[in-house]
Amino acid sequence: MKSGSDLFADRPLMTMRVSRDSGRSWEPERAVFGGDVDLAPLGTSEWPPCQCPRCAARAKRSGR
């Protein structure tokens, strides 16, 4: 039986196309796969993560 990470190994986490001229032209689509990046899971669903002094101090204490 496959583990959770193996089930989606061939599926991208995100795809994107970027325009640098207000949508007149677009770069080719890029896909980001789970093995491409080494990111820790988010500690909260808040995005972007809060940068206030209280939350920043809490993140330092928890090692995130």
Image: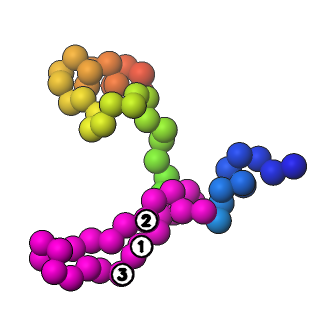
Q: Which residues are magenta?
A: 11-36
Residue situated furthest right in the rendering: 1
Residue 19 position within the rendered picture, expressed as x and y whole percent measured from the top left: 21, 74
Query: Which amino acid does the dot numbered 3 rest on?
Result: Pro
Please state the horizontal and vertical placement of residue 12, each as a whole percent of the image. Answer: 54, 62
30, above or below 11, in the image: below
Q: Are marks 3 and 1 in contact (CB under 8 Å)?
A: yes
Q: CA distance from mark 3 to mark 1?
A: 6 Å
Q: What type of secondary structure mainly makes up the magenta span?
A: loop
Q: Residue 10 appears at what percent x and percent y?
A: 65, 65
Is 16 on the left-hand or right-hand side of 38?
A: left
User: The C terminus lies in which quarter of the figure?
Assistant: top left
Is 53 placed above or below 39 here? Answer: above
Dot 2: what SS?
A: strand
Disc 1 marks a residue whose amino acid type is Arg
| Disc 3: which residue | 28
Q: Is residue 29 above or below residue 7?
A: below
Task: Report which residue position mark 1 lands on.
Answer: 30
- Residue matched to label 2: 15
N-term mark: 2 or 1: 2
